[in-house]
């Protein structure tokens, strides 16, 4: 994956989520990334590893990918930092808003924080 722009990273995140592809998703995150949010009204605090594990579990269990749709909006880039919202519907029957922050290091962009909620 080419992580040479925030939009490329966000699209890879969207594609990896829809494909239930842990490897593709893992490449989107900075090694020190954090993840927090609310899943069906319950707080989740940790690292993207929680999401990656869940994606892997869904793939192993054969969760349907049908009906999945996602896009990002509100992308703002200022120098070597960026933020955007990923709007996701139909991921294992759930809808999400993911508020992403990204950073560029040595020509490579990655997600450093994900704040999410189910809708």
Image (spheres, helix red, strand yellow):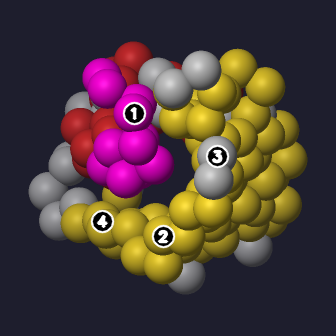
Q: Mark 1 points at which residue?
A: 4
Residue pictured at 14% horizontal, 57% vertical: 66
Task: Tell me where residue 70 sits by quadrant.
Answer: bottom left
- On whether residue 3 falls in the magenta region, the answer is yes
Spatial separation of the CA atoms under disc 2 and disc 4: 14 Å
Q: Name the residue under label 4.
A: 70
Describe the element under mark 2 as helix, strand or loop.
Answer: strand
Q: Name the residue under label 3.
A: 80
Q: Give the range drawn in magenta.
A: 1-11
Task: Tell me where residue 37 sits by quadrant.
Answer: bottom right
Residue pictured at 20% horizontal, 49% vertical: 65
Task: Tell me where residue 93 sits by quadrant.
Answer: bottom left
Where residue 64 appears, as percent x and y from the top left, is 21, 47
Describe the element under mark 3 as helix, strand or loop.
Answer: loop
Residue 100 shows up from this direction? no
Residue 9 shows up from this direction? yes
Q: Name the residue under label 2.
A: 75
Where residue 52 appears, as percent x and y from the top left, is 54, 29
Horizontal relation, residue 47 to residue 10: left or right: right
Spatial separation of the CA atoms under disc 4 and disc 1: 21 Å
Q: Which of 93 and 34 is in front in this view?
A: 34
Where residue 26 appears, as percent x and y from the top left, is 50, 24
Q: Earlier in the sequence, mark 4 or mark 3?
A: 4
Please identify the quadrant where the N terminus is shown.
top left
Residue pictured at 70% horizontal, 20% vertical: 31
Q: Furthest-left residue in view? A: 66
Q: Which of marks 2 and 1 is nearer the N terminus?
A: 1
Where residue 57 appears, as percent x and y from the top left, is 45, 28
Dot 3 and dot 1 residues touching (CB under 8 Å): no
Label 1 neighbour load within 10 Å: few <14, some 14-19, many 20+: some
Spatial separation of the CA atoms under disc 3 and disc 1: 11 Å
């Amino acid at each position: 994956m080419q992580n040479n722009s925030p939009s490329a990273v966000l699209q890879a995140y969207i594609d990896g989520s829809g494909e239930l592809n842990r490897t593709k998703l893992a490449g989107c995150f900075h090694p020190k990334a954090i993840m927090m949010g609310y899943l069906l009204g319950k707080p989740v605090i940790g690292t993207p590893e929680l999401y990656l594990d869940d994606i892997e579990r869904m793939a192993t269990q054969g969760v349907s990918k049908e009906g999945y749709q996602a896009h990002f909006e509100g992308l703002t880039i200022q120098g070597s930092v960026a933020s955007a919202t990923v709007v996701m519907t139909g991921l294992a029957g759930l809808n999400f808003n993911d508020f992403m922050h990204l950073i560029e290091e040595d020509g490579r962009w990655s997600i450093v924080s994900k704040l999410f909620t189910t809708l």
